[in-house]
Image: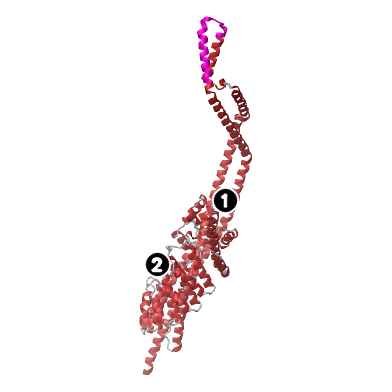
Amino acid sequence: MQSPSHMDGGSSRRAGRWQRLTAVAAMLAGAMLPAFAADRPMVPTPRIKIITNVAEVRGVQDPHYGDSLFHFYQARYFSAVTTLMVSQHFERLPVHAEEAEILRGGLFLSYGLHREAGEVFAQLIERGAPPPVRDRAWFYLAKIRYQRGLLAEADDALRRIEGTLPADLQEDRVLLQANVLMARGDFTAAAGVLDGLAKGGREQRDASLYARYNLGVALVRQGEALKGAPYLVTVGTQATASEEMRGLRDKANLALGFSALQIGDTVLARQYLERVRLNGMLSNKALLGFGWAAAEQRKYSDALVPWTELAQRDPGDSAVLEAKLAVPYAYAELGALAQALELYKEAIGSFDREDARLDESVASIRAGKLLDGLIERNPGDEMGWFWNIGELPDLPNGAHLAPVMARHEFQEAFKNYRDLLFLARNLRQWDENLGVLRDMLANRRQAFEQRLPLVREKERALDLSAAEQRHDALMVELDRAEREVDVAAFASPRERELQQRLDRVRDVLERSGSDPDLAAARDRYRRVAGSLLWQQSEQFPVRLWGARKGLITLQNNLAQAQLRNVALAAGQRDEPARLDAFAARIEALAARVQAMIPRVAELTRAQQSEVQEMAVAELLRQKERLATYGTQARFAVAQIYDRANTAKEAVRAPAQ
């Protein structure tokens, strides 16, 4: 905002005009956004873009890969990358090894780990991954190199993509190529690349509008306003129902309006600024610029319309504060000095009140209320590169914080702070979990020491050696019975009992000699003994097969018992060492966790201080701007009084 001048003479007029142009140039710098990264960050989006489409085509065949994808689709990216790396460590992803590496590299990239992501993609290429995977790796390498400012290397990586990427990645590929060309100053080639994108579907057209906006702004900043204007006009006249695209359209028209103001074309500036929505996010700047366009045409009555509307809005916006100076300036130019004087005094009071509120906001921020409020109002289970501030904290004079938190630097710094808080919670949880693991290991060791003697005692009671000897003896007996066709060897208990009775009957008959009275008994004995022999002979094959089957089962059971005995001996020998190895691993992890807890806490405090001071610095800049406004207003009041005194002296002079 210029310092209004009401002094007579051409020098004061020229000074005022120079100050107004300076203010316009300052507003232009704030209206134009720098480049592609500001509107459409060159990082993987929280969608399937960083995963190959192979899983969608043939399905997930490795369950552990599906587990990582489950976390990924739930936007739990930290859990996704940790479970994925664990599965890779234990080689649980034989089918989806390449896709898993693409996912891991993409997640690293999303967290800003450019070096680690670059190593993943470079290794994929060196290993000779399949062409679709290799093309994706080259694409992500190009993205990483672009973010690092390695433009020639990024262009080389893009040229190495041989096939056509999936539709979603192909869109980003074209945008990346256009941005690389713009960064290298080849705006003509960038425009040619974007022409093809503009002919695609709605998403591609939206992406093209972003790129065209950035291309137009880049050309304007390079001093090629005439070349950049058509791209901004295309964006500024685009019909769209999307709120995001309407906001971009407002940005384009605002940039066009202030660019026209900068070159002195106030008529064109007013046409562009009229296209900005009255209640949009950029409406305040548009109203201010529209008023200055009218003022440059010396149409101060026209300038008062947008400035008066703007001056009644929230004073937390710098454009509103400038309007509080612009309105009395316009009245002064119209000759309404009394009204201008009153409005200047009101502006001074408003600036003083706003300065006091800024002091309150600074004190609140340094007390930690800002970050605590942001964490409370914007909860989240995990750290994530795609997380954004959705709600402002409930703090006094919270309007001051909106421009602070709209800055990319603040957003990224606060994300780092929030991620550090998550890591601190994660470390504390692991510290507790390691304590639980210690208890589990102690219980396991105690149970082993208590149960081992009992198991060994039972093992000794089994006497496997005697059982094996018994098995061998039974095998010999079975072979003899089969060889001699000893049908009585497989007699059932009832048959053996009957055979014993028959033997007793036979003994009695033999002792009786040839007594004729026992002839019937002898005949009966012969028939019963023959029936028993026939029955045993009939069942002999079946009983022989059953006996052999039983011996085979016994042999298998003895073999399993021997294996268990060997395993028991090995466990008795190795389990203590295994438990000791677990204990050592737990203690090593505990030492790492204990070392990281204070380190993360220190980083958290440092990051908290940095974020708070970043916000405070912005508010202090607002205070400086307020002080400048107040000085200008007081200077304008002094000028009005000076003009009034000069007028009185001019009236008195003839009378004297």
Residue 138 occupies quadrant: bottom right
Q: Which residue position is annotated with label 2?
A: 243
Q: Which residues are magenta?
A: 508-536
Magenta stretch holds residue 292: no
Q: How is the image coloured?
A: secondary structure
Q: Is residue 568 visible?
A: yes
Residue 448 occupies quadrant: top right
Mark 2 nearby-residue class (10 Å; few <14, some 14–19, many ≥20): few
Q: Amino acid at mark 2?
A: Glu
Q: Is residue 616 visible?
A: no
Q: Amino acid at mark 1?
A: Glu
The image shows a total of numbered marks equal to: 2
Q: Position of residue 637 (x, y in %)?
A: 41, 81
Magenta stretch holds residue 513: yes
208 shown above or below 335: above
Between 326 and 145, the one lying in front of the other is 145
Q: Mark number for residue 417?
A: none
Q: Which residue position is annotated with label 1?
A: 91
Closer to the camera: disc 1 or disc 2?
1
Between 140 and 89, the one lying in front of the other is 140
